[in-house]
Amino acid sequence: MINRSHRDDRILGVGIDLVSIDRIKKLCVRYPERFLHRVFSPGEINESRGKYAYLAGRFAVKESVLKAMGTGLSNGMRWTEIETITLPNGLPETRCTGQTANHMEFRGVGEIWVSISHDMGSATAFVVLTGG
């Protein structure tokens, strides 16, 4: 048996979101700079290399994190404060900064577990927040 008494592995929140890749493409085409810089971090923009499926997946993560927190985009939180980058092993890693990080800390969130998938013109993300 593994002793995890030093950790708090409780699930604190779960969120899921489905995003149309075409919807993200239309927003990028219609409001290229405004939309990208209002919603995505510089790291996400650079890593996307203009791929709309990538951006749709990252948007789905942002929505899933907000759903898992149960807050929506409120209390001074910003889209760009939820950033998902790809680790060298290919796994997505989500980090929060600013007011979003403050809210996570207040709730006792230690880790953000995320999975992203793309299929048939949609991107989906599933997020689990655990204590720690």
Image: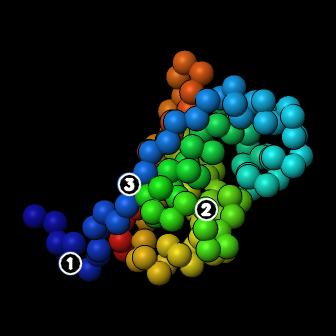
Q: Is residue 43 left or right of residue 60?
A: right
Q: Nearer the viewer, mark 1 or mark 2?
A: 2
Type of residue at label 2?
Leu
Q: Is residue 43 above or below residue 126?
A: below
Q: Callout 3, which amino acid?
A: Val
Q: Position of residue 22 (x, y in %)?
A: 69, 25
SS class of the residue under badge 2?
A: loop
Q: Is residue 26 above or below residue 121?
A: below
Rendered position, 7 above or below 41: below
User: Closer to the camera, 77 or 123?
Assistant: 77
The N terminus: image quadrant: bottom left
Q: Can you give x and y, in whole percent of width and height, for residue 42 in the image?
A: 79, 55
Q: Which residue is mark 3?
A: 14
Which type of secondary structure does the marked residue at label 3 adopt?
Answer: strand
- Which label belongs to residue 73? 2
User: Which of the marked residues, 1 or 3, is nearer the chain's N terminus?
Assistant: 1
For the point 28% across and 67% down, which residue is it?
Answer: 10
First along the sequence among labels 1 and 2: 1
The numbered dot on residue 5 is: 1
Q: Is residue 34 left or right of residue 3?
A: right
